Image (tube, rainbow, N blue to C red):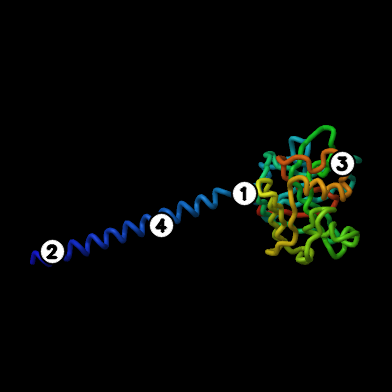
Amino acid sequence: MKKLVLVLLAVFFVISCKQKETKNKVVIETKAKTMTQEDWEVLFDGTNLGKWTEYSKNSISDNWKLENGAMVFYPPENKPEGESYNLVTKSEYTDFVLSLEWQISEGGNSGIFWGVKEKQSLPEAYQTGPEIQVLDNTKHPDAKAGTTHQAGALYDMIAPSKDVTKAVGEWNTCQITVNHKTNQGSVVLNGETIVKFSVNNPEWGAMVAKSKFADWPEFGKYTTGKIGLQDHGDKVAYRNIKIKKL
């Protein structure tokens, strides 16, 4: 009888240890999952534009609308001369992974900026912020102007290795990495890495010197700046925007 009691106690001890181990494992895995989710800052969840404003403004015009979980830009029919409606984040970022989806209209053009600085002397976001091109490669003339102007390109500097864009009206998934600590930048479009580039000098400066931006005094000069979405006069939509600091 005594032997049986000892055996039962041993079995109970083993079961208790297993249950504790399982519980701890669940807690650890849940915590790890939560930490992974918390690494990402949601910039747009489809419900509001609270983390954005128009460049050098304190508000957002009615040209940007919320539709079916996306922010959609409708260019005005009579745009005032010198007026633009580029969106920028309220916060600034240095090293990051930016993830979003974009959908371009037929013959449309837009772009995604980083390193944007708002200055009274600079009326456009593209005067400081490098751009990853958003384009209808089939019908927009920029696609014929050279591969460094095609969708996914580091605009006017690095061409995409291939065209992986989806048809007009479909959503393209884009991930942009800018990491000054490792001197690495990249663009992943629809699951394929199509662009890689250095982000630090002297390589960055050499790239700019060979581009249309060579004589632009403040272009690409800021390692810390805002994320921007371009008004290029065409309808464009963005959704599921999030960023992870590196």
Residue 46: where, in percent of width, then height? Answer: 65, 51
**Type of amino acid at the residue the image marks with label 4:** Val
Q: CA distance from mark 1 to mark 4?
A: 25 Å
Front residue of 71/18: it is: 18
For image coordinates 18% across by 61% down, the residue present is 9
The first of marks 1 and 2 along the sequence is 2
**Type of amino acid at the residue the image marks with label 1:** Lys
For image coordinates 68% across by 46% down, the residue present is 180
Circles 3 and 4 in contact, beta carbons < 8 Å: no
Q: Residues within 10 Å of mark 3 (few under 14, many from 20)?
A: few
Residue picked out by circle 4: 26
**Type of amino acid at the residue the image marks with label 3:** Trp
Q: Residues within 10 Å of mark 1 (few under 14, many from 20)?
A: some
The first of marks 1 and 4 along the sequence is 4
Q: Nearer the viewer, mark 3 or mark 1?
A: 3
Residue picked out by circle 2: 5
Front residue of 107/228: it is: 228
Q: Quadrant of the N terminus?
A: bottom left
The first of marks 3 and 2 along the sequence is 2
Residue picked out by circle 1: 244
Q: CA distance from mark 3 to mark 2?
A: 85 Å
* Mark linked to residue 216: 3
